[in-house]
Amino acid sequence: VFSAFQDNIDELDEKDRIGNSSVYTAAKHSLEKFHPGKNLKFYEITPSFLKRYEKWMIDNGHSVTTVAIYARCIRRLYNRAIRNSLAKPDEYPFGREADQYHIPEPRNIKKALPIEDIKKIFTYQPENPGVEAYSRDLWVLSV
C-alpha cells in the first residue's frame, strides 16, 4: 500500500499536480503512523482496519473532514490496485453495506452571513468615525 501511495505521489508530481500530491503525501504519512512498518498489504485493509484508523485519527485530533479525505485516497488506490490485479475485488472494504466501511460525510456548516446582516453592516453608521468606520470599510471592501 505504501509503495502504491508513493507511485501515485510520483505521478502527481510529474504532472505538476502539487495540491493532490500533498494530500496523498499527508494521507500516506498518517497511515504510516497508524500502521508502523514497511509493509501493508491491500488485503489487510479491511472494514475493521479502516474503522480503527478512523477512530485513531479522531482520537489524535483530526477532523471528520480529514478522515474522509484520507479514506478517499486509500479507496482510490485500492480501486487502482484491483484494476491492476494487485488486490481482489471480493476483499474490497468500502461500500454502504453493514459489513463494509462507509467513508464519513462531514457536515458542511454554512459560514456565510444572512443577507439581512450584510445589509446592516453596509448601512451601519459608526459612532466612532475612526476605528469603527475603518473596520467597516475594510469589511465592505472585502465583500
Image (cartoon, rainbow, N blue to C red):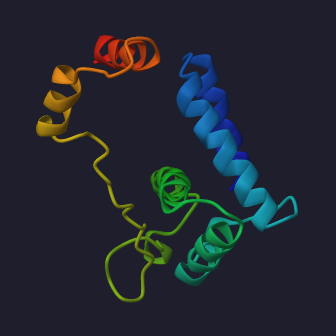
Image vertical order of residue 19 relative to residue 67, above or below: above
Nearer to the camera, 103 or 138: 138
Quarter of the figure with the C terminus: top left
Question: Image height check: is 79 above or below 49?
Answer: above
- Rendering coords of residue 134 (x, y %): 41, 12
- Which residue is situated farthest in the right direction here? 37
Percent across and percent down for residue 99 are 42, 88
Taking the image as shown, residue 75 lies to the left or right of residue 4, namely left
Looking at this rendering, what residue extends furthest in the bottom direction?
Answer: 98
> In the image, is residue 132 above or below residue 90?
above
Residue 66: name its quadrant.
Answer: bottom right
- Residue 54 position by quadrant: bottom right
Farthest residue toward the front? 127
Q: Answer left or right for 34 relative to 72.
A: right
Residue pictured at 63% horizontal, 22% vertical: 13
Depicted 15 relative to depicted 87: above or below: above
Give how far across and how far down residue 141 sits, in percent.
Answer: 31, 10
Residue at left 72%, top 55%?
Answer: 30
